[in-house]
Image: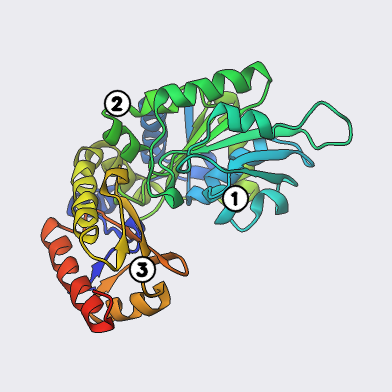
């Protein structure tokens, strides 16, 4: 949309010209038969970068997460997850519908779970309580404002979970953002998690696709469950080609998105209409509390002026920076936000 500054999500990113050329020239085959060479390269390279044995290309992050839940659990078990976690709140209760599992939500500190909080939520060894079948982490944590979990924090959790024979899945939709923010490798953040899902279609700017990685035996079973969920794809190398570019080329520019999010946070912190602490903005997501009006009042007025943002509550808005929003766009958005605030009398 020309002239629109779209800060709703990094899912709105458009593919680069290099991605478009790669898609047009992609070598393809039937991926259900495992014969698409571009997909195979993408899966192998993703597993290598994440430090895992194998990978499986899936259409969406939700599918990747739910394939993992299905494989790690048995019907009637619980999944420990942070109470604002994507798996719990934004995946259509699929863990219940398809895996027969119940979420056990736990409140984290700024969205981040510690072992102490997880341990307190684990089912005791009594016959009348559902067993804990899985611990699900999220890095970065979307609805906590893009907060990051360090490799050491993850290691403490995986070590303790594995002592109790509980697997750990990492929803790493934006794990590359976390790696950039922490100046570390994604393989370090993936650590000993039994499975990891990450997205190509967010900050990495591919048009579609996510990756599930783990041990070879796990991924072999994931092929079966992906097909069960309707995720078998044919000549999908045209999409995998763009994802390969996203994987190899795009992480190096994510710091720009982080800088722009902080730039926006510093500006909003100067306005009485917002409650923002710029020090808490670690990656490309900014969640701000509104003072004196509601998100349903603010967002339509902002849209009328050509800036799009999202709502995470009646008096809370979310801005997400990405490749298609420049520093100049941020400055223009701030000017518009100031004008909107003045027009509403909350400046």
Indicate which disc residue 176 carries.
none
Q: Quadrant of the C terminus?
A: bottom left
State the residue at coordinates (59%, 41%).
81
Q: Nearer the viewer, residue 160 or 63?
A: 160
Helix, strand, or loop for circle 2?
Answer: loop
- The first of marks 3 and 1 along the sequence is 1
Residue 189 lies, in percent from the top left, at 40, 27
144 to the left or right of 229: left
Residue 331 lies, in percent from the top left, at 13, 63
Q: Which of 199 and 156 is in front in this view?
A: 156
> Taking 113 as reference, is 59 above or below it?
below
**Disc 1 + disc 2, Cβ < 8 Å:** no
Distance in Å between CA atoms under marks 2 and 3? 37 Å
Q: Nearer the viewer, residue 241 or 111?
A: 111
Helix, strand, or loop for circle 1?
Answer: helix
- The first of marks 1 and 2 along the sequence is 1
- The first of marks 2 and 3 along the sequence is 2
Residue named by callout 1: 88
Q: Is residue 2 visible?
A: no
Residue 231 lies, in percent from the top left, at 56, 50
Residue named by callout 2: 184
Tell me the crowding category of disc 1: few under 14, some 14 to 19, or many 20 or more residues within 10 angstroms, Cα based. many
Residue named by callout 3: 291
> Taking 194 as reference, is 275 above or below it?
below
113 to the left or right of 23: right
């Amino acid at each position: 949309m020309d002239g629109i500054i779209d800060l709703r999500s990094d899912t709105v990113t458009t593919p680069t010209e290099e991605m478009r050329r790669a898609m047009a020239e992609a070598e393809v085959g039937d991926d259900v038969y495992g014969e698409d060479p571009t997909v195979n390269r993408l899966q192998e390279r993703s597993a290598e970068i994440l430090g895992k044995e194998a990978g499986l290309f899936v259409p969406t992050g939700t599918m990747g997460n739910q394939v993992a839940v299905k494989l790690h659990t048995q019907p009637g078990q619980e999944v420990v997850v942070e109470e604002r976690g994507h798996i719990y709140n934004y995946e259509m209760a699929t863990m219940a519908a398809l895996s027969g599992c119940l979420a056990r939500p736990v409140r984290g500190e700024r969205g981040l779970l510690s072992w102490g909080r997880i341990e307190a939520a684990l089912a005791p060894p009594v016959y009348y309580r559902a067993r804990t079948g899985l611990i699900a982490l999220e890095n970065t944590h979307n609805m906590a404002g893009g907060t990051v979990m360090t490799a050491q924090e993850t290691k403490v959790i995986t070590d303790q979970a594995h002592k109790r024979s509980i697997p750990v899945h990492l929803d790493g939709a934006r794990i590359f953002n976390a790696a950039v923010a922490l100046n570390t490798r994604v393989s370090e953040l993936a650590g000993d998690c039994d499975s990891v899902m990450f997205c190509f279609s967010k900050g990495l700017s591919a048009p579609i696709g996510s990756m599930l990685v783990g041990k070879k035996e796990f991924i072999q079973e994931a092929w079966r469950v992906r097909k069960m969920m309707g995720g078998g794809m044919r000549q999908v190398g045209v999409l995998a080609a763009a994802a390969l570019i996203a994987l190899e080329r795009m992480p190096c520019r994510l710091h720009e998105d982080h800088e722009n999010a902080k730039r926006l946070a510093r500006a909003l912190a100067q306005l009485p209409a917002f409650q923002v602490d710029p020090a808490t903005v670690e990656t490309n997501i900014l969640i701000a509390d509104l003072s004196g009006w509601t998100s349903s009042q603010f967002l339509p007025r902002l849209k009328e002026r050509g800036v799009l943002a999202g709502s995470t509550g009646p008096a809370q808005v979310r801005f997400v920076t990405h490749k298609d929003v420049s520093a100049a766009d941020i400055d223009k958005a701030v000017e518009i936000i100031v004008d909107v605030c003045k027009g509403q009398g909350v400046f």
